[in-house]
Image: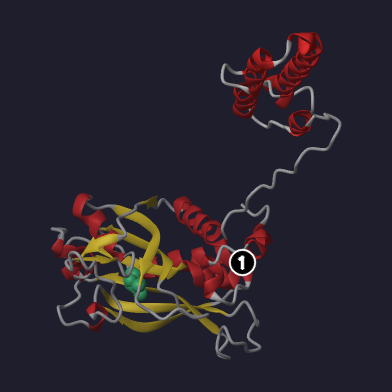
Amino acid sequence: DTHKEEITAFSAQTPEQVEEFRIKYLGTKGLVKAIMGEMRNVPNERKKEFGQVLNDFKLFVEEKYESLRQSNTREAKGTSAQIDWSLPGDPITAGTRHPLNIVRNQIVSIFKRLGFAVAEGPEIEDDWHNFGAMNLPEDHPARDMQDTFYISQNPSWLLRTHTSSVQARVMETQKPPIRVICPGRVYRNETISARAHCFFHQVEGLYVDENVSFADLKQTLYFFVQEMFGNDVKVRFRPSYFPFTEPSAEMDISCLICKGKGCNICKHTGWVEILGSGMVHPNVLDNFGIDSNKYTGFAFGMGVERITQLKYQVNDLRLYSQNDVRFLKQFTGVV
Ligand code: PHE
């Protein structure tokens, strides 16, 4: 009877467990065989009685085995038998596009309509493409270890600090007319905070041809801003300095957050800087055998995070890389 209790309680979830049961009770070294062996020691007059009990027990075990086997076949476990098809299904939650991708795609599509092609380059760069070819002298502070991540195994490699490295890669292989935009991730050794991160995203633009002028640069960027933010947005250019452009200018747009009333984003100036730009420095063209007497060009580089911040009022850079669904879900349906 104790065996019977144990057997009744036995449950199997897998075919392996069913087989375990068979070996334990019905196998050649199993319990049933063992008890059968005991028949030898039973006195003759009790053999009939004992035989019957044993037979019952054997049948009992076999029935249990059969029922375990039945409920562990694939059909029983799987589809039809145990599934209630009238129950509502599990919802499939669709993902959302990342806001930085949404905005990157918008930027790219605006410039595509102006005839720019997309070009990409590696995030692990060498000094030449990131700095040297871009006319950054050896002792320029941007090369300082403070800003640049160098690859420890091979310090002649680094993580690109700007997408201007892709300008170099493009001019290496293409001759004018060149008209490209280069979206990508860039890295700088900054302490992570709401306003700074060790990586962010840029879209670089480069246009090299005969007779490209600063007026072309201004009009192109003005068109971009209107397409991106609407016709009410004002732009202004401020003289600036980049080693790879001359003259250089930074472009501000009127603050979309406070509409000139004053807020933290525009530091109460009413203006927000969104990009650096300028006429490609003749040294840069010459570095790639592009005749700087014949050709001129403009270039610009904008921060995707900054533009996304203005477009969607994201006020902490860290949100972009925390993968918090409460943040990401707010972009549901935006393509
Ligand atoms: N590379 C510059 C930066 O990262 C931006 C820039 C690009 C400026 C092209 C001028 C021309 O700040």
Residue type, mark 1 in image: Gly
Is 279 situated left or right of 71 in this image?
A: left
Q: How is the image coloured?
A: secondary structure
Where residue 92 sits, quadrant-wise, is top right
In the rendered image, residue 25, in percent from the top left (x then y), is placed at: 65, 23
Residue occupying the point 51% across, 66% down: 321
Whether residue 277 is visible:
no
In the rendered image, residue 175, in percent from the top left (x then y), is placed at: 21, 51
Whether residue 130 is visible:
yes
Q: Residues within 10 Å of mark 1 (few under 14, many from 20)?
A: few
Which of the two residues, 195 or 21, is positioned nearer the viewer here? 21
Q: Where ligand 1 lies, by quadrant?
A: bottom left
Residue occupying the point 39% across, 60% down: 184
Q: Which residue is mark 1?
A: 230
**Does 140 appear above or below 84?**
below
Which of the two residues, 229 or 44, is positioned nearer the viewer here? 44
The answer to whether the residue bearing label 1 lies less than 8 angstroms from the nearest atom of ligand 1 is no
